[in-house]
Amino acid sequence: MGVITCTLAEFDSVVAPNRLFQAMSIDSHNFLPKVVPHFVKSVEFVEGDSTTVGCVKNINFPDEAPYRYVKTRVDEIDCTNFYLKYTSIEGDIFPDTLECAVYENKYDASSTGTHYKMVAHYHMKGDNVMDDEEIESAKQGIQMMFKAIEDHLIANPQVYA
């Protein structure tokens, strides 16, 4: 099994890191379905809560999406340094060539707000490789979702203030 590592997102934002981390990591089960329902229909806890290692969530996609759900598990979380590492462990989102996907999200303070970086580690089955088009599609989706989240937080400065 090979691992393909790539940066899926690297953005600068005027929004403070604690607000982005809260919206995208800690309270994502409430925030995402309300703010980006075209990306996330609902989030259900299977085990634990969003602040604990081992937390398992089902993320359900909208009916018009090409996939129905993905199940994720929190592997590491650091609420002080705004870091989250989680693994997508199940779902119809996986092609037959993918065992699992591990994601690292880091929200660093910058002179203008936040420097956000998301790194993916795709654990492939056998000698399979990840298609460049799949990676580009994932990058575009993350960029669109991040922009919608950022716009909402800018327009609503009281949210997670």
Image (cartoon, rainbow, N blue to C red):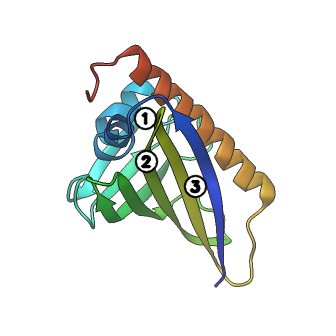
Q: Say above or below: 101 vs 66.
A: below
Looking at the image, which residue is at 74% across and 83% down? 127
Identify the element where label 1 is drawn: loop
Amino acid type at circle 3 is Ile
Q: Position of residue 75 (x, y in %)?
A: 35, 68
Q: Position of residue 135 (x, y in %)?
A: 71, 54
Identify the element where label 2 is drawn: strand
Residue placed most toward the observer, 93 or 49: 49
Between the residue at mark 2 and the residue at mark 3, the CA separation in whole angstroms equals: 26 Å
Amino acid type at circle 1 is Lys
Between the residue at mark 3 and the residue at mark 1, the CA separation in whole angstroms equals: 15 Å
Sequence-first tag of 2 and 1: 1
Q: Which mark is residue 111?
A: none
Sequence-first tag of 2 and 3: 3
Q: Position of residue 115 (x, y in %)?
A: 50, 43
Q: Say above or below: 13 vs 126.
A: above
Between the residue at mark 2 and the residue at mark 1, the CA separation in whole angstroms equals: 24 Å
Which residue position holds label 3? 93
Left or right, 56 with respect to 148, comes to: left
Q: Which mark is residue 41?
A: 1
- Is residue 64 at all visible to an observer of this figure? no
Q: Position of residue 52 (x, y in %)?
A: 22, 60
Left or right, 60 with respect to 121, comes to: left
Quarter of the rendering occupied by the C terminus: top left
